[in-house]
């Protein structure tokens, strides 16, 4: 027994000694053994290395930026040999044979960078990134190889050689099985776009399975959000010819569920605000014929939880569940208990330019507040609306009683702009605009901009400073100095100089409602009268000093700032120049009301827009410089200042006006996803009650027309053709108008 044990120990020790060797390195030029020792924890000078230890050392060497490659050799001698290729620094990065993507685009996405060490793992990632980028644009056969060119003993040039191949595109997108929603409407819910012969304004989608899978989920979620909880969606991609493909979505809609019963927790029902909220929800649900609609439920749930917050209730929040029951749904609003946690601290990262106190001032939350998801989401929404913030990311770390918040911001570091552009407006024709702006002065979040504009009627420059108080994220103060030369010779019959200095305060109550007020000192000098015997002209000649008070309230629930198709917009403006402190006292009120009604299961819509104005002198006659004008962009089919009282060739304007427009909007003829929208409209309105004429009949005018709004990178560009249906003798027509901005 003892003899066998001795024999076994001898064999183990012999084998261990047989496979144990020392370690040597070759290929070292800039590095030495001391440098190698700092890379690994093993003692590289010992003489009894095992193979598993060598593997660990090789892995350590591969992880080092100092080493590009490692070659292991188990020599027949009594040592292991590791041959090292020392790393080199990238001097230049070149791309060859890339036609569709520019060098700058590729340099921006790859991980290898100039003046960094060459890395095999990064090169492998870069090849994958480049190929993925090309495939997302429809280049299915792309391949990328890498060449290394010696620049000096310790530097190299890195060359990516790209074979792009042919680009493939979609030319047809089909939907099968959709009974409730049309093909055209479903096409607006996905990102993929078909390229057909009539599409002049888009490029079509490239072949990218990630986008197709994303679209599949969007269609599925869209159906589920609208009550089709059992929907099933799949797709196929078929080859056509000339590198074109057709994308086919197959939809099994299932039944559309109705809500049969609604249950509430006792705590919810006991709250004072519940009755009114539930009444509003019931009306909305009945309007939707009791069909399940997730958007409707989410909005109701948000209102309930907001009300809990505003009533200082933090011990629970409300959620809902749905249960299927014989083709119907049981809806339950349930209370979920939560331990109210206090925000312990808010750490801010990523701000290289914007001051930390500036970012904190835009947050609705602060340390010491109860944690509330609604307030956090509102804080991020408020912060992201500022142009110097690209994006924000938030991380929460909870303890037993507190919550720590880490907020990382992605800044827009280039906040200063110089703009020189030619402009065109239907009313004032060609012009030139020069603007200088900084949207984040010294990281304060404040805005300074100077503008110079010249066109056929105006020559104006102004300097504006907008300051956002650190104590309130909803307020802004604006200070303005301006100088303006107006040439009204062809309309009112004189020229005028305006100079002023003003202050305004704006308060944003929520994402929809805002209030504004301001005060301006304005000096006006009327000169160069076209006719010194015309009272409407001579009343405007001379020097006048006025204090002008302005008040504004606005509510906007429309779904798009440039091309709304649903919602309402209301704006009320009041201008008052008081009689006691102004040479030219008057009051002026304007009201704008816009209504958009989206047609069911469609992106088409009906709109009904109204504008009203009332002005009155508080001393004698309302001067034409303060009067309203009609025609051009505010009443299509007629020339700028082409409607209203005149005296010979002098335009008088009016103290009162109104316009009403009803219309129908849709995408351009073929495809709802095209970037051009069409509107058919009928307008009616009038202007009158000038203090400079007794002929003040409030005669109605009307026009009908069509407009095309091109959605471009710089905003909408509108072309309109309208013809008058009813007009007066002195009215001036203009059938075609062009403007930057939507037509209605």
Image: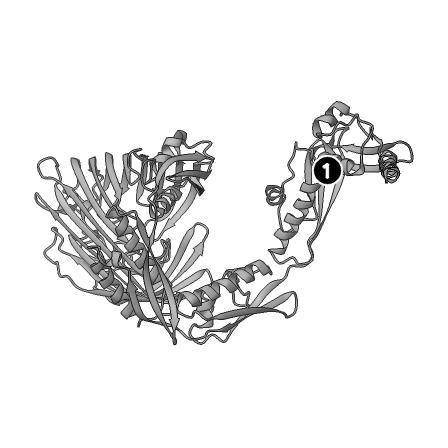
The quadrant of the picture occupied by the C terminus is bottom left
**Residue at 50% across / 72% down in the picture?**
251
Residue shown at 50% from the left, 63% from the top: 217
- Closer to the camera in the image, 319 or 642: 319
* Closer to the camera in the image, 301 or 473: 301
Q: Note whether residue 247 is visible.
A: no
Residue 628 seen in render: yes
Residue 653: % across, % down? 19, 52
Viewer-nearest residue: 148 or 336: 336
x%, y% of residue 240? 64, 70
435 on left or right of 98: left
Q: Is residue 535 left or right of residue 329?
A: left
Residue indicated by mark 1: 59
* Label 1 Cα neighbours within 10 Å, binned few <14 / some 14-19 / many ≥20: few
- Where's residue 317, x and y in %? 32, 52
Picture quarter containing residue 34?
top right
Residue 86 is left or right of residue 608, and the answer is right
Please say if 391 is above or below 283. above
Q: Height in image: 437 above or below 693?
A: above
């Amino acid at each position: 027994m003892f003899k066998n044990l001795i024999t076994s120990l001898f064999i183990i020790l012999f084998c261990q000694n047989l496979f144990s060797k020392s370690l040597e390195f070759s290929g070292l030029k800039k590095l030495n053994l001391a440098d190698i020792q700092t890379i690994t924890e093993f003692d590289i000078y010992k003489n009894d290395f095992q193979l598993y230890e060598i593997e660990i050392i090789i892995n350590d060497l591969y992880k080092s930026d100092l080493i590009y490659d490692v070659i292991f050799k188990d020599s027949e001698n009594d040592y292991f040999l590791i041959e090292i290729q020392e790393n080199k620094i990238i001097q230049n990065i070149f791309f060859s044979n890339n036609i569709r993507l520019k060098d700058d685009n590729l340099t921006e996405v790859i991980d290898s960078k100039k003046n960094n060490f060459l890395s095999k793992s990064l090169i492998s990632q870069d090849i994958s990134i480049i190929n993925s980028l090309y495939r997302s644009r429809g280049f299915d056969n792309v391949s990328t190889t890498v060449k290394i060119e010696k620049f000096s003993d310790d530097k190299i040039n890195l060359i990516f050689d790209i074979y792009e191949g042919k680009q493939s595109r979609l030319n047809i997108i089909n939907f099968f099985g959709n009974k409730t929603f049309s093909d055209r409407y479903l096409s607006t819910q996905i990102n993929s776009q078909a390229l057909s012969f009539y599409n002049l304004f888009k490029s079509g989608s490239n072949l990218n399975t990630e986008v197709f899978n994303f679209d599949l989920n969007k269609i599925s979620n869209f159906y589920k959000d609208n009550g089709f909880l059992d929907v099933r969606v799949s797709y196929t991609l078929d080859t056509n010819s000339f590198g074109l493909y057709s994308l086919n979505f197959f939809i099994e809609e299932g039944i559309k569920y109705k809500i049969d019963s609604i249950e509430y927790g006792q705590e919810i029902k006991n709250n004072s605000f519940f009755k009114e909220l539930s009444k509003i929800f019931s009306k909305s649900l009945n309007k939707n014929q009791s069909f399940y609609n997730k958007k409707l439920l989410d909005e109701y749930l948000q209102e309930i939880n907001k009300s809990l917050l505003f009533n200082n209730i933090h011990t629970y929040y409300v959620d809902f569940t749905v249960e299927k029951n014989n083709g119907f749904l049981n809806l339950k609003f349930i209370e979920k208990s939560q331990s109210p946690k206090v925000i312990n601290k808010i750490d801010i990262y990523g701000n290289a330019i914007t001051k930390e106190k500036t970012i904190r001032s835009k947050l609705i939350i602060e340390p010491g507040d109860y944690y509330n998801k609604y307030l956090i989401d509102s804080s991020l929404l408020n912060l992201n609306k500022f142009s110097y913030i690209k994006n924000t990311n938030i991380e929460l770390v909870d303890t037993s009683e507190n919550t720590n918040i880490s907020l990382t911001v992605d800044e827009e570091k280039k906040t200063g702009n110089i703009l020189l552009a030619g402009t065109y407006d239907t009313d004032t024709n060609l012009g030139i605009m020069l603007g200088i702006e900084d949207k984040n002065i010294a990281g304060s979040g404040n805005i300074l901009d100077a503008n110079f504009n010249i066109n056929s009627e105006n020559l104006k420059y102004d300097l504006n400073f907008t300051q956002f108080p650190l104590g309130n994220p909803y307020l802004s103060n604006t200070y303005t100095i301006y100088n303006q030369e107006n040439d009204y010779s062809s309309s009112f019959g004189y020229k005028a100089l305006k100079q002023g200095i003003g202050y305004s305060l704006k308060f944003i109550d929520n994402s929809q409602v805002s209030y504004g007020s301001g005060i301006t000192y304005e000096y006006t000098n009327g000169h160069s009268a076209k006719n010194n015997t015309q009272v409407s002209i001579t009343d405007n000649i001379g020097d006048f000093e006025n204090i002008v008070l302005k008040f504004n309230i606005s509510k906007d629930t429309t779904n798009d700032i440039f091309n709304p198709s649903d919602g309402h917009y209301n704006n009320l403006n009041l201008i008052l120049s008081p009689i006691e402190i102004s040479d030219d006292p008057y009051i002026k009120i304007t009201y704008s009301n816009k209504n958009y009604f989206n047609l069911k299961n469609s992106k088409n819509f009906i709109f009904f827009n109204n504008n009203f104005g009332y002005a009155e002198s508080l001393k004698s006659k309302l001067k034409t410089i303060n009067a309203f004008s009609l025609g051009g962009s505010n009443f299509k089919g007629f020339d700028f200042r082409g409607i209203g009282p005149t005296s010979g060739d002098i335009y008088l304007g009016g103290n009162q006006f109104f316009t009403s427009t009803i219309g129908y909007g849709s995408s351009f003829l073929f495809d709802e996803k095209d970037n051009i929208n069409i509107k058919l409209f009928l307008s009616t309105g009038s202007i009158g009650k000038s203090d400079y004429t007794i002929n003040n009949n409030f005669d109605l005018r009307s026009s009908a027309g069509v407009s095309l709004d091109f959605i471009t990178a710089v905003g909408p560009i509108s072309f309109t053709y309208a013809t008058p249906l009813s007009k007066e003798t002195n009215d001036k027509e203009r059938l075609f108008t062009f403007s930057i901005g939507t037509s209605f």
